[in-house]
Amino acid sequence: MFDPRAWGLPKAAINNLGQRLYDFWDRYSDFFQTTTRDTSYYALDYLSALLRMNDQRNFTKIGLSSGESPQNIQHFMSNSPWSAEDVLIQIREEISNTASFATGSALILDESADEKASDKTVGAARQHNGRLGKVEMSQVGTFLAYANDGIWTWIDGELFLPQRWFDRTMAKKRTKLGVPPDRKFATKIELGWKMIERVRDEGLPFEIVCFDTLYGRSLWLRRKVEARGLIYMADVPCSTRVYLNRPVVAVPHKAEGQGGRGFSKARVVSEEKAVEVRQIAARPNGVWRRVRVRASERGEINDEFMARRVWTTDGEEEPVEEWLVIRRDAEGKLYYALSNEDGETTLERLAWGKCQRHFIESSNQEAKSEAGWDELRAQKYLAWEHHLALTMMATWFIAETKLEWREKYPRKEELKEELGVDQLPALSMASIRELLRAVMPLPQLTVEGATSLVVEQLVNRARSRKSRMKAMGHKHSPV
């Protein structure tokens, strides 16, 4: 059981990881060239650092670890005019051409917030930070992940700019931080729909779009997805109200002899009232059935599910029939979702869609902990986009490696019997990074490099003190 080959880890493949990373970068190298310079080698340094370093993946540390000037790395990320969009399009094109992803793939829409010290960073404002569970000074991005049979990668992202960033008083700051002049305010939900439309128009293959509750409770978004002929599985809060029978929506007639103006807007005029989805789950006559969705490293996803047809409307639009899918896990916790799957869809299919929610959490967590997404300390809009492109390259490199190794080097089935399990753990992003560090060890800092780093830290701390003193109204007085 300790033979690496039995686990699909031949020595030759591991020793080739460094070359594999170089070949991967080479497919994208043209995108990092400008009209005056070829700066593609900075992209290789940055990508390599994201995958090999464990923390503090900032411009200074990345530069020193790769033997490049930190100032050059910062310029490449914050000012160089290479197109992040072209990189993301190439990633999605490669995914589209991957035969294993032709069926069974899911799009997953979610957001991720990173705490910031001040509003000097583009998009930063006091807003809800889901990771912290409260309102804090944060920068929020909306992201699309792509998942298929345990393999995932980020494929698109948009920086959310709160409404106040478009006030006239913020015009100078927008210009200073490089916010595109044609950028207009858009809600997170509108940004999410923009990304879904974009990848759909590019022909990316997927069978279902999954939302967490922020996006799932948006009737507008669900209707947009439905209109494009796409299937969704939208998580909703337990307080979501639905109708058990089709409600009648109409403009009410003014009763005879009733004074005042007549009604101008449609509303639900039928007698049946909407009920909260948690009330449906609590009914004693609900039919629950256990469904084995898939095996996982921690056991099996083998929970109880209930599904029934319901109607939803905002009171003005015509009602739409949807599936209400309820999941009850081993601890008795309930989860709710609405889906536009066909009325004849099986409970097994609905349960599969409902459990794609797991990859929302996994994708964001690993993008941060393993690919360094949340370690960006730059302030400019362009730096955010460039960091996004290179982070997505890192997640796609890992996903592609996992897929290719799984297909080329299958594990020995005897391992299951020897270990007494029916499912072997998947190769993780952390595992591949560990192997990559072994074949491409990070260089140790020279005395000069370490000294340079310490001096830069002292300068930055002095500048921080100057900023704090200025904010407090103190002026420097020479001694």
Image (tube, grey):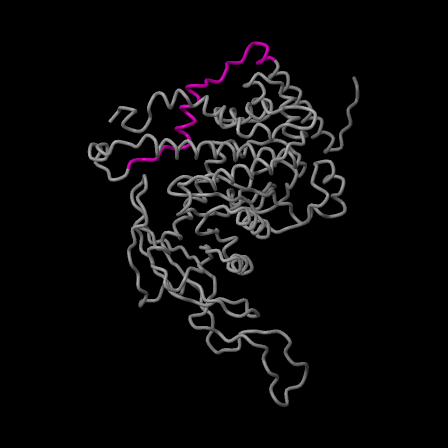
Q: Is 465 situated above or below 455?
A: below
Q: Nearer the viewer, residue 11 or 235?
A: 11
The residue segment tinted magenta is 424-451
Left or right: residue 285 versus residue 254 is left
- State the quadrant of the C terminus: top right
Left or right: residue 306 versus residue 275 is left
Q: Is residue 91 magenta?
A: no
Residue drawn at the location 56% of the way across and 73% of the way down = 267
Q: Is residue 429 magenta?
A: yes
Residue 5 position in % (x across, y down): 29, 25
Residue 77 position in % (x across, y down): 63, 29
- State the quadrant of the N terminus: top left
Residue drawn at the location 72% of the way across and 33% of the way down = 472
Q: Residue furthest top?
A: 447
Q: Is 422 situated above or below 230?
A: above
Instruction: Give the image quarter of residue 74.
Output: top right
Residue 432 position in % (x across, y down): 41, 28
Left or right: residue 135 versus residue 282 is right
Q: Nearer the viewer, residue 24 or 4?
A: 24
Residue 26 position in % (x across, y down): 53, 26
Q: Nearer the viewer, residue 210 or 460?
A: 210
Q: Residue furthest right?
A: 478
Residue drawn at the location 40% of the way across and 23% of the way down = 435
